[in-house]
Amino acid sequence: MSTASSLTQVQAPAPLRLAVGVQLAEAVGMLVATGFSVAATVNGKSYHTDSGIALSLLAFVAVLAIAGFAYATAKVKPWSRTPALMIQLFTVIGGIMLVQGHRLDWGIPTLILAVAAAACLLAPASVKALNRKE
Protein backbone atom coordinates (compact mmCIF):
# COMPACT_ATOMS: atom_id res chain seq x y z
CA MET A 1 0.00 0.00 0.00
CA SER A 2 1.44 3.36 -0.94
CA THR A 3 1.62 6.29 1.43
CA ALA A 4 -0.54 8.46 -0.81
CA SER A 5 -3.41 5.96 -0.86
CA SER A 6 -3.34 5.56 2.93
CA LEU A 7 -3.70 9.32 3.39
CA THR A 8 -6.71 9.76 1.13
CA GLN A 9 -9.96 10.60 2.84
CA VAL A 10 -12.91 8.35 2.04
CA GLN A 11 -16.06 10.31 1.18
CA ALA A 12 -18.94 9.42 3.49
CA PRO A 13 -22.03 8.14 1.66
CA ALA A 14 -25.31 10.02 2.06
CA PRO A 15 -26.81 7.75 4.77
CA LEU A 16 -23.65 8.10 6.83
CA ARG A 17 -23.72 11.89 6.49
CA LEU A 18 -27.37 11.84 7.58
CA ALA A 19 -26.42 9.68 10.60
CA VAL A 20 -23.80 12.28 11.53
CA GLY A 21 -26.40 15.04 11.30
CA VAL A 22 -28.78 13.10 13.51
CA GLN A 23 -26.01 12.42 16.02
CA LEU A 24 -25.21 16.13 16.13
CA ALA A 25 -28.92 16.88 16.69
CA GLU A 26 -28.86 14.39 19.56
CA ALA A 27 -25.80 16.14 21.00
CA VAL A 28 -27.59 19.49 20.84
CA GLY A 29 -30.68 17.98 22.51
CA MET A 30 -28.51 16.52 25.23
CA LEU A 31 -26.81 19.90 25.68
CA VAL A 32 -30.24 21.51 26.17
CA ALA A 33 -31.15 18.82 28.71
CA THR A 34 -27.81 19.47 30.45
CA GLY A 35 -28.74 23.14 30.66
CA PHE A 36 -32.03 22.24 32.33
CA SER A 37 -30.14 20.01 34.77
CA VAL A 38 -27.70 22.79 35.63
CA ALA A 39 -30.56 25.28 36.07
CA ALA A 40 -32.42 22.91 38.38
CA THR A 41 -29.28 22.33 40.43
CA VAL A 42 -28.49 26.05 40.71
CA ASN A 43 -32.10 26.85 41.69
CA GLY A 44 -32.06 24.20 44.43
CA LYS A 45 -34.65 22.00 42.68
CA SER A 46 -32.34 18.99 42.53
CA TYR A 47 -32.98 16.25 45.10
CA HIS A 48 -29.43 16.74 46.40
CA THR A 49 -27.08 19.44 45.20
CA ASP A 50 -24.19 16.99 44.94
CA SER A 51 -26.17 14.57 42.78
CA GLY A 52 -27.40 17.44 40.61
CA ILE A 53 -23.83 18.55 39.99
CA ALA A 54 -22.73 14.98 39.23
CA LEU A 55 -25.63 14.36 36.85
CA SER A 56 -24.99 17.66 35.07
CA LEU A 57 -21.32 16.77 34.62
CA LEU A 58 -22.19 13.30 33.34
CA ALA A 59 -24.70 14.78 30.91
CA PHE A 60 -22.05 17.18 29.60
CA VAL A 61 -19.60 14.29 29.17
CA ALA A 62 -22.33 12.50 27.20
CA VAL A 63 -22.65 15.55 24.93
CA LEU A 64 -18.91 15.46 24.27
CA ALA A 65 -19.02 11.71 23.60
CA ILE A 66 -21.93 11.95 21.18
CA ALA A 67 -20.29 14.82 19.31
CA GLY A 68 -16.94 13.02 19.28
CA PHE A 69 -18.42 9.85 17.83
CA ALA A 70 -20.30 11.93 15.26
CA TYR A 71 -16.98 13.50 14.26
CA ALA A 72 -15.33 10.08 13.93
CA THR A 73 -18.29 8.81 11.91
CA ALA A 74 -18.02 11.84 9.61
CA LYS A 75 -14.35 10.96 9.09
CA VAL A 76 -15.49 7.41 8.16
CA LYS A 77 -13.52 5.76 10.95
CA PRO A 78 -14.51 2.07 11.02
CA TRP A 79 -14.30 1.89 14.82
CA SER A 80 -16.97 4.60 15.18
CA ARG A 81 -19.91 2.40 14.14
CA THR A 82 -20.16 0.40 17.38
CA PRO A 83 -20.10 3.38 19.77
CA ALA A 84 -22.51 5.28 17.52
CA LEU A 85 -24.94 2.35 17.53
CA MET A 86 -24.57 1.90 21.29
CA ILE A 87 -25.48 5.56 21.76
CA GLN A 88 -28.63 4.90 19.73
CA LEU A 89 -29.49 1.94 21.97
CA PHE A 90 -29.10 4.11 25.08
CA THR A 91 -31.07 6.88 23.39
CA VAL A 92 -33.94 4.47 22.67
CA ILE A 93 -33.94 3.42 26.32
CA GLY A 94 -33.99 7.07 27.39
CA GLY A 95 -36.78 7.83 24.90
CA ILE A 96 -38.88 4.95 26.22
CA MET A 97 -38.37 6.20 29.77
CA LEU A 98 -39.44 9.68 28.72
CA VAL A 99 -42.58 8.34 27.03
CA GLN A 100 -43.41 6.21 30.07
CA GLY A 101 -42.92 9.28 32.25
CA HIS A 102 -45.51 11.13 30.12
CA ARG A 103 -42.89 13.41 28.55
CA LEU A 104 -44.04 12.84 24.99
CA ASP A 105 -42.64 16.23 23.94
CA TRP A 106 -39.11 14.91 24.59
CA GLY A 107 -39.65 11.16 24.26
CA ILE A 108 -41.10 10.90 20.78
CA PRO A 109 -38.47 13.11 19.08
CA THR A 110 -35.78 11.19 20.98
CA LEU A 111 -37.09 7.87 19.69
CA ILE A 112 -37.42 9.19 16.14
CA LEU A 113 -33.84 10.49 16.14
CA ALA A 114 -32.44 7.25 17.57
CA VAL A 115 -34.24 5.05 15.05
CA ALA A 116 -33.23 7.35 12.18
CA ALA A 117 -29.57 7.34 13.22
CA ALA A 118 -29.51 3.56 13.67
CA ALA A 119 -31.17 3.02 10.29
CA CYS A 120 -28.65 5.33 8.60
CA LEU A 121 -25.71 3.63 10.32
CA LEU A 122 -26.98 0.22 9.23
CA ALA A 123 -27.79 1.25 5.65
CA PRO A 124 -25.83 -0.85 3.11
CA ALA A 125 -23.77 2.13 1.90
CA SER A 126 -22.81 3.04 5.47
CA VAL A 127 -21.88 -0.53 6.34
CA LYS A 128 -19.73 -0.76 3.21
CA ALA A 129 -17.97 2.53 3.97
CA LEU A 130 -17.28 1.60 7.59
CA ASN A 131 -16.11 -1.92 6.74
CA ARG A 132 -13.08 -0.75 4.79
CA LYS A 133 -9.60 -1.70 5.87
CA GLU A 134 -7.36 1.02 7.27
Image (cartoon, helix red, strand yellow):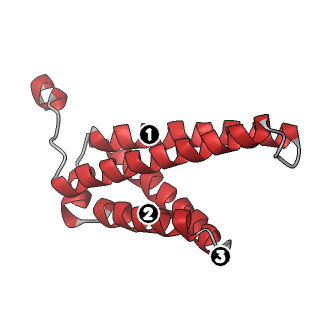
User: Helix, strand, or loop for circle 1?
Assistant: helix
- Relative placement, left or right, of 7 versus 25 is left
Dividing the picture into quadrants, the one containing residue 116 is bottom left
Q: Image point 14% across, 31% down: which residue?
A: 8
Considering the image in quadrants, where does the N terminus appear? Answer: top left
Which circle marks residue 81 in the picture? none
**Residue farthest to the right, as pictured:** 48
Label 3 to label 1, Cα distance in Å? 27 Å
Nearer the N terminus, badge 3 or badge 1? 1
Viewer can see residue 38: yes
Which residue in the structure is indicated by mark 3? 100
In space, the residues marked 1 and 2 are separated at their CA atoms by: 14 Å
Q: Are marks 2 and 3 in contact (CB under 8 Å)?
A: no
Look at label 2 and name its amino acid: Ala
Looking at the image, which residue is at 67% across and 41% down? 58
Sequence-wise, the earlier of marks 2 and 3 is: 3
Q: Nearer the viewer, residue 105 or 68?
A: 105
Find residue 52 and report its horizontal and vertical position in percent.
79, 42
Give the residue type at disc 3. Gln
* Spatial separation of the CA atoms under disc 2 and disc 3: 17 Å
Depth-wise, is mark 2 or mark 3 nearer the camera? 3
Residue 67's disc number: 1
Q: Quadrant of residue 40?
A: top right
Q: Residue placed at 40% from the left, 68% from the top?
A: 115
> Can you give x and y, in whole percent of width and height, for residue 71 in the image?
36, 37
**x then y, percent, for residue 77:** 31, 41
Instruction: State which tag comes first along the sequence, 1 or 2.
Output: 1
**Residue beneath disc 2:** 114
Question: As rendered, which of 11 and 98 lies closer to the eye?
Answer: 98
